[in-house]
């Protein structure tokens, strides 16, 4: 099975256990941030919603071992997430190509809206932590896109409208994994090179 050329879904910025400081920083940078979200996995976040992608500040409560990898990882950019509308097919394609990948994981977080609370639901397919040293690489299947990409969160004082490009500079960048799935021309994927 050939994996379609992935597109960038969101960029993850790890603020570890300092989410209030991270939120303040992004407000001062001119971003409109979503209200704090609490994942069923134990993490918490704020998002800066852009055009077709977003920036995610991710954190874990101090001492909470459910997301120990967040607290153990360095501050800053630590995740590139690609979008999919078929996480089962992505997992099968990566697995069949010998890419070190974890089984799909489904989770949610409540979203407060003016008409009540609803659950934003996701399923992710992650490359294993040892697959690359450049941070976390995974795919996200949004089941409730309307709860994430909301117009009231898309207007930023700094004028930001999207992520144009991300560049991985590392000896063991994960592009070899994409070439195994997408062929030799897959060295540039969804604005990532």
Image: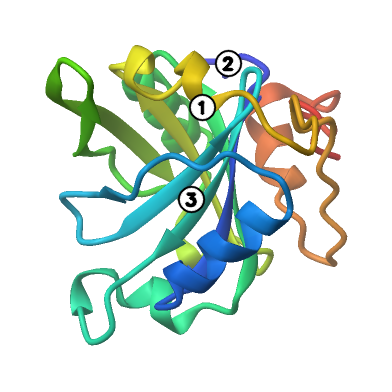
Q: Is residue 6 left or right of residue 187?
A: left
Q: What residue appears at the point 60 percent right and 76 percent down from the top-left corner?
A: 75
Q: Are marks 1 and 3 in contact (CB under 8 Å)?
A: no
Q: Position of residue 104 (x, y in %)?
A: 28, 38
Give whichever of discs 2 and 3 has the lower sequence position. 2
Q: What residue appears at the point 85 percent right and 48 percent down from the top-left corner?
A: 167
Q: CA distance from mark 2 to mark 3?
A: 17 Å
Quick check: can you spot residue 124?
A: yes
- Which residue position holds label 3? 127
- Which residue position holds label 1? 153
Residue nearest the observer in this picture, 184 or 121 = 121
Q: Is residue 107 above or below residue 58?
A: above
Residue nearest the observer in this picture, 63 or 89 = 63
Q: Quadrant of residue 8?
A: top right
Q: What residue appears at the point 70 percent right and 51 percent down from the top-left corner?
A: 174
- Density class for disc 2 (Cα within 10 Å; few <14, some 14-19, many ≥20) is some
- Which residue position holds label 2? 2
Tally the marks.
Answer: 3
Q: Quadrant of residue 50?
A: top right
Give whichever of discs 2 and 1 has the lower sequence position. 2
Q: What residue appears at the point 52 percent right and 24 percent down from the top-left corner?
A: 83
Q: Position of residue 168 (x, y in %)?
A: 82, 53
């Amino acid at each position: 099975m050939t994996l379609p050329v992935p597109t960038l879904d969101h960029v993850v910025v790890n603020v570890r256990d300092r989410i209030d400081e991270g939120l303040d920083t992004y407000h001062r940078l001119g971003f409109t941030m979503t209200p704090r979200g609490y994942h069923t996995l134990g993490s918490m976040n704020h998002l800066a919603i852009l055009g077709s992608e977003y920036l995610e500040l991710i954190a874990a409560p101090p001492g909470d071992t459910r997301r120990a990898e967040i607290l153990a990882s360095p501050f800053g950019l630590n995740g590139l997430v690609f979008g999919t509308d078929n996480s089962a097919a992505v997992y099968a394609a990566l697995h069949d190509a010998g890419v070190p990948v974890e089984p799909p994981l489904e989770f949610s977080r409540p979203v407060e809206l003016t008409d009540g609370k609803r659950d934003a639901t996701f399923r992710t397919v992650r490359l294993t932590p040892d697959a690359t040293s450049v941070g976390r690489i995974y795919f996200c299947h949004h089941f409730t896109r309307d709860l994430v990409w909301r117009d009231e969160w898309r207007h930023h004082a700094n004028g930001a409208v999207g992520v144009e490009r991300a560049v991985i500079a590392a000896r063991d960048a994960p592009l070899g994994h994409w070439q195994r799935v997408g062929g030799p021309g897959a060295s540039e994927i969804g604005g990532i090179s």
